[in-house]
C-alpha cells in the first residue's frame, strides 16, 4: 500500500465558537503506483485532506501511513514526509520567486539538504520531465515564461524533490484546453514512466474519466464514494445530489441504455462510446 | 492562523453611538484625546471616566469585549507603568535592588497608566462603533476643506478603503504561499534571526508580485467602471447631521470645558 | 437589428521587451448586434482579451476603428459614455471589487457617473436583485464564494445601466457550481433585460449556449457562426488546440466511420434523437 488513511478527523479551531469539523473519520487506501482522482464540491474537505497527506496540517485524530511509514507520529520530521509526498497547490506558478528557473526548481532539493551535485542532477531531470528544455530555460527568469510554462516550472519544483507520491490540486485551473492537455500529459507520463503514485484533484469529470484508475469522492468531510471510474460514475443521482456530474459521454450512453438500447452504459471515453455504438448499429 | 488578526474591528450593534455621524465621532475622539492630555489631577480623570463610561453604556458594546482590545497592548501599559514607577525622583518608600520606588513615582505611574488605558479604550470605542467605510467617509469629508491647500482628501480615503478591502485577501494569500513553500521544504519557524529573515524571501517575493498584479488589475477594473478620481463623484450614502449629533457634540464640548476649567481655573 | 459594437479593420500593436512591434490584432472586423449573446473562444494569446479591452476603450486601436453605440472609442470625449454603455467583468473575482461591503461596491460605478444618491440606491437594489445577491448586500466581499463575487462584479456593471456587458473569462477561476451561477446570471440578463453579452471563455459547454460563436487565433477571427456551424469544424478546432463537446466529437468520429450522422449535434438529447433516426 502506498497510502493508508485510518479514521482521520480534523477539526478547525477546536473548543471555540468557530469550531468546524473538516474531516470526519476518513479511511481509505491507495495502492502503490495508482493514479487516483480526488473529487468533491468546494468545501467538501479535499484540500484539508491533501494537506494532511503532506504533513502541513496535523490530524485531530487518526493515522496516515505513506509506504508503511506513519507520518502522523509525534516525532516525525517534516523533511521525511516531504521526501515521500510532494504537494502541488492550485496556481503553483504564484509561488515562484527566484531569479532563474534553475534556482527556483532547486529550492526544494536544497531544503532537503541534498548535495550540490545531487540537487543539480534532480533539477535537470525535473525540468526535462515537465517537458521543458533544461539548457534553454535554466538561466531564464520564471517570469518571462507563458502561464502554462510557468506552471510546469512550479510543478518541476516539487517533482525535483522526488516524492514517492505526487499530489496535485487542480493543476489545470485557468489554463486553456491546450495548456491543460500538455500538463495532464506530463502528469500521465510521470505516472507511467516512474510508477509514481499520483493523486489528482480536479473538477473536470472528463479528465478524471480519461486518466485515473480509481476515484475518491469527498462530501462534507467524509468519503462518499470510492471505486474505479466505471463504478463511481454509475451513481449519477448521488453524484448530482452532492453537486458533481459525470462525463457528457457517459450521460449519453446511460440515456441510450435507459431507452432500451442494447448498449453498455459504463463507458468513459469517446473512443469506447464510438466502438460500442458502432457495434450496436452494425448489429441492427 | 493569520486570519485571526482583526484590524479596525467593528462591533455591529444598533445603538445611538453607532448611528452618530462618523465626522462627529472622529472629532469627539479628537477632543477626548486632547482632554486626556490636559488633565493633571485625578478628579479630572473622574470627569473623563464619566464621559467614557456613559458613551460605552450607550454603545451597547460589552465591556469585556472592549477590555479584550487592551490585551495586545498589555506590554506597553506595563512598560509605561514600570518606567514611571522607577524613574521618578522623590520620597523613597521602597528599595528594589538598585531601583528606588518613590511616592511620586507611584502617583506618576498610576497617572500615566490611567491615561494610556483611557486613551486606548476611548479610541477603540471609535473603531468598534464605526464601520471602516463610515470611518473613511468621515475622514474624507473632514479633510475636504483642506483640499484647496493641496490635501488629497478623496485619494487618501480611497486608499484606505482599498487597503481595508485587500487586507483579508492578502492575509489569505500569505497563508497559501507559506504553505506552498513549506511543502517545498521551506522552514519559517526555526533558526536564528538572520536565517529567519532569509527564509522570508520565498514568501515576500511572491506576495509582492501578487500585490502588484492585483493593483494592476484593480486599476483596470476601476477605470472600466468610469472611475476618474473624486471630481463630480456622488455617494450613495450621503452623510447628514441629526439632532443626536448636536447633542453628542454639546456633551463632548461640555466635558472639554470642565477639564479646561479644572486645569486652569480651579 | 441595431449593431451595438462595430469593429472595423482593428489593428493593435504593442512593443515587447526587445522593443519589437508585435501585432496582437491583425485587421479584425466584427459587428455585435444589440441583444445578441456572443461567445469568443481561442487559446491564450490569440487576441481575444485584447479585442475585449477595445470594446470599452481600455485599449485604443493602433489602426482601424471601434464604435460602441455609434461612438468612436478613439475620441477621448466619448470614453466615459462608452464605458457606461459597455461594462466589463474580468477574470479574477478578487481583483475587481473595490469596497469592503457588497452594496457599496455595486454603488461604485454609479457614484463615479455622478448620479443622485436616491437613484443610486434604486439602481443598487435592482442590480443586486437581478443577480440574486440581495441577501448578501451588507456582507464583506471576502466572505463570498468565487461565483458570488463574480455576480457582485456583474451587479456593479448592471448598476451603470449598460447596453452591453463584456466578460473576459469570468468563469476561468471558478468551480463548476460557480460557473453555473455566473452562466445562469448572464443568460438571464440577456434574455430578460435584453442586455448584449460578449462572453470570452475556454469552456465549450458555455459556448454552446451562445447565439453566435467566433474563434480567434493569432490576432485573427478564423471561424464564425452559430454554435452548430462552428463546432461542426471539429478538425479545425482540434488543430487550434480547442475543445468540442464530447457528443459533437463522437458524431464527427461516427461520420468518419461511414455513418450518415448529422454534424449539427451539441447536446446529449440531440445525439440521442439523431442516433435513433439512423435506425
Image (spheres, coloured by chain):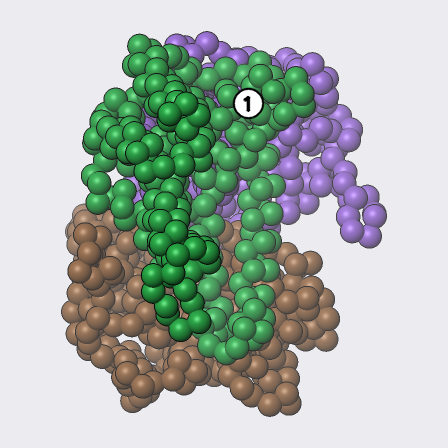
**Residue found 46% across the figure and 9% down from its top:** C116
Q: Is residue C209 left or right of residue C29?
A: left
Residue to which mark 1 is pinned: B143
Given residues A266 and B73, the one toward you in this image is B73
Q: Position of residue C120 (x, y in %)?
A: 42, 15
Look at the image and give the colour of chain A: brown
Q: Vertical placement of C129 versus B107: above or below?
A: above
Q: Vertical placement of C164 versus C254: above or below?
A: above
Given residues B140 and C155, the one toward you in this image is B140
Q: Is residue C235 left or right of residue C117?
A: right
Q: Chain of mark 1?
A: B
Look at the image and give the colour of chain B: green
Q: Position of residue A42 (x, y in %)?
A: 31, 52
Mark 1, residues whose alpha carbon is within 10 Å: few (<14), some, or many (≥20)?
some
Determine whether the residue tagged by mark 1 lies in a helix, strand or loop. Answer: helix
Q: Which chain identifier belongs to the purple chain? A: C
Q: Position of residue A220 (x, y in %)?
A: 20, 57
Q: Position of residue B210 (x, y in %)?
A: 56, 52
User: Looking at the image, can residue B75 be seen?
Assistant: no
**Residue found 56% across the figure and 19% down from its top:** B144
**Residue found 34% across the figure and 19% down from its top:** B254
Amino acid at each position: 500500500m502506498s497510502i493508508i488513511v485510518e479514521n482521520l478527523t480534523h477539526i478547525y479551531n477546536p473548543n471555540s465558537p468557530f469550531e468546524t469539523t473538516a474531516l470526519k473519520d476518513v479511511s481509505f487506501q491507495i495502492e502503490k503506483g495508482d493514479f487516483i482522482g480526488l473529487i468533491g464540491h468546494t468545501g467538501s474537505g479535499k484540500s484539508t485532506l491533501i494537506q494532511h497527506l503532506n504533513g502541513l496540517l496535523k490530524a485531530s485524530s487518526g493515522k496516515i501511513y505513506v509506504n508503511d511509514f506513519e507520518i502522523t507520529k509525534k516525532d516525525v520530521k517534516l523533511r521525511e514526509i516531504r521526501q515521500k509526498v510532494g504537494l502541488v497547490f492550485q496556481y503553483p506558478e504564484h509561488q515562484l520567486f527566484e531569479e532563474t528557473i534553475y534556482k527556483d526548481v532547486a529550492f526544494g532539493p536544497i531544503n532537503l539538504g541534498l548535495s550540490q551535485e545531487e540537487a543539480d542532477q534532480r533539477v535537470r531531470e525535473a525540468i526535462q520531465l515537465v517537458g521543458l528544455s533544461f539548457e534553454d530555460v535554466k538561466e531564464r527568469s520564471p517570469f518571462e515564461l507563458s502561464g502554462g510554462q510557468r506552471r510546469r516550472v512550479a510543478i518541476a519544483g516539487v517533482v525535483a524533490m522526488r516524492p514517492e507520491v505526487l499530489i496535485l490540486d487542480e493543476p489545470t485551473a485557468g489554463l486553456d484546453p491546450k495548456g491543460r492537455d500538455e500538463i495532464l500529459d506530463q502528469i500521465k507520463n510521470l505516472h507511467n514512466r516512474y510508477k509514481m503514485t499520483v493523486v489528482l484533484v480536479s473538477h473536470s469529470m472528463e479528465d478524471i474519466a480519461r486518466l485515473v484508475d480509481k476515484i475518491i469522492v469527498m462530501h462534507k468531510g467524509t468519503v462518499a464514494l470510492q471505486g474505479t471510474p466505471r463504478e463511481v460514475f454509475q451513481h449519477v443521482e448521488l453524484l448530482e445530489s452532492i453537486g458533481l456530474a459525470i462525463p457528457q459521454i457517459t450521460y449519453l450512453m446511460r440515456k441510450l441504455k435507459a431507452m432500451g438500447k442494447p448498449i453498455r452504459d459504463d463507458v468513459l471515453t469517446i473512443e469506447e462510446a464510438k466502438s460500442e455504438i458502432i457495434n450496436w448499429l452494425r448489429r441492427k | 492562523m493569520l486570519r485571526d488578526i482583526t484590524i479596525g474591528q467593528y462591533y455591529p450593534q444598533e445603538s445611538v453611538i453607532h448611528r452618530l455621524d462618523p465626522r462627529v465621532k472622529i472629532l469627539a475622539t479628537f477632543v477626548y484625546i486632547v482632554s486626556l492630555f490636559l488633565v493633571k489631577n485625578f478628579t479630572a480623570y473622574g470627569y473623563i471616566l464619566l464621559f467614557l463610561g456613559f458613551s460605552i453604556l450607550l454603545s451597547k458594546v460589552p465591556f469585556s469585549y472592549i477590555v479584550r482590545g487592551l490585551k495586545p497592548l498589555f506590554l506597553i501599559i506595563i512598560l509605561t507603568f514600570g518606567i514611571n514607577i522607577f524613574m521618578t525622583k522623590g520620597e523613597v518608600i521602597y528599595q528594589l535592588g538598585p531601583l528606588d520606588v518613590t511616592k511620586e513615582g507611584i502617583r506618576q505611574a498610576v497617572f500615566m497608566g490611567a491615561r494610556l488605558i483611557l486613551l486606548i479604550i476611548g479610541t477603540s470605542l471609535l473603531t468598534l462603533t464605526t464601520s471602516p467605510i463610515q470611518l473613511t467617509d468621515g475622514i474624507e469629508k473632514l479633510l475636504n476643506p483642506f483640499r484647496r491647500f493641496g490635501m488629497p482628501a478623496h485619494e487618501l480615503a480611497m486608499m484606505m478603503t482599498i487597503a481595508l478591502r485587500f487586507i483579508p485577501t492578502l492575509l489569505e494569500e500569505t497563508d497559501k504561499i507559506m504553505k506552498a513553500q513549506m511543502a517545498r521544504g521551506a522552514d519559517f519557524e526555526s533558526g536564528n534571526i538572520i536565517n529567519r529573515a532569509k527564509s522570508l524571501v520565498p514568501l515576500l517575493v511572491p506576495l509582492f508580485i501578487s500585490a502588484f498584479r492585483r493593483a494592476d488589475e484593480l486599476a483596470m477594473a476601476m477605470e472600466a467602471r468610469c472611475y476618474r478620481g473624486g471630481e463630480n463623484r456622488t455617494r450613495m450614502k450621503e452623510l447628514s447631521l441629526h439632532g443626536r449629533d448636536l447633542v453628542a457634540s454639546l456633551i463632548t464640548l461640555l466635558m472639554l470645558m470642565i477639564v479646561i476649567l479644572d486645569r486652569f481655573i480651579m | 437589428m441595431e449593431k451595438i459594437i462595430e469593429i472595423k479593420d482593428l489593428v493593435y500593436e504593442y512593443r515587447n521587451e526587445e522593443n519589437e512591434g508585435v501585432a496582437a490584432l491583425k485587421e479584425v472586423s466584427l459587428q455585435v448586434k444589440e441583444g445578441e449573446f456572443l461567445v469568443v473562444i481561442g487559446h491564450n494569446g490569440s487576441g481575444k482579451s485584447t479585442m475585449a479591452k477595445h470594446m470599452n476603450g481600455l485599449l485604443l486601436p493602433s489602426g482601424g476603428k471601434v464604435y460602441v453605440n455609434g461612438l468612436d472609442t478613439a475620441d477621448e470625449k466619448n470614453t466615459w459614455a462608452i464605458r457606461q454603455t459597455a461594462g466589463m467583468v474580468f477574470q479574477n473575482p478578487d481583483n475587481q471589487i473595490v469596497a469592503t461591503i457588497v452594496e457599496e461596491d455595486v454603488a461604485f460605478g454609479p457614484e463615479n457617473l455622478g448620479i443622485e444618491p436616491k437613484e443610486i440606491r434604486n439602481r443598487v437594489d435592482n442590480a443586486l436583485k437581478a443577480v440574486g445577491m440581495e441577501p448578501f448586500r451588507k456582507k464583506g466581499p471576502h466572505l463570498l464564494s468565487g461565483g458570488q463575487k463574480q455576480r457582485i462584479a456583474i451587479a456593479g456593471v448592471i448598476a451603470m445601466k449598460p447596453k452591453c456587458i463584456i466578460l473576459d473569462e469570468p468563469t476561468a477561476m471558478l468551480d463548476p457550481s460557480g460557473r453555473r451561477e455566473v452562466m445562469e446570471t448572464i443568460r438571464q440578463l440577456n434574455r430578460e433585460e435584453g442586455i448584449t453579452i460578449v462572453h470570452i471563455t475556454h469552456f465549450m459547454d458555455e459556448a454552446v449556449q451562445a447565439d453566435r460563436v467566433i474563434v480567434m487565433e493569432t490576432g485573427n477571427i478564423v471561424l464564425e457562426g452559430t454554435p452548430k456551424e462552428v463546432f461542426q469544424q471539429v478538425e479545425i478546432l482540434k488543430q487550434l488546440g480547442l475543445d468540442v463537446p464530447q457528443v459533437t466529437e463522437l458524431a464527427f468520429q461516427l461520420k468518419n466511420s461511414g455513418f450518415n450522422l448529422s454534424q449539427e449535434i451539441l447536446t446529449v438529447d440531440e445525439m440521442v434523437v439523431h442516433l435513433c433516426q439512423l435506425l
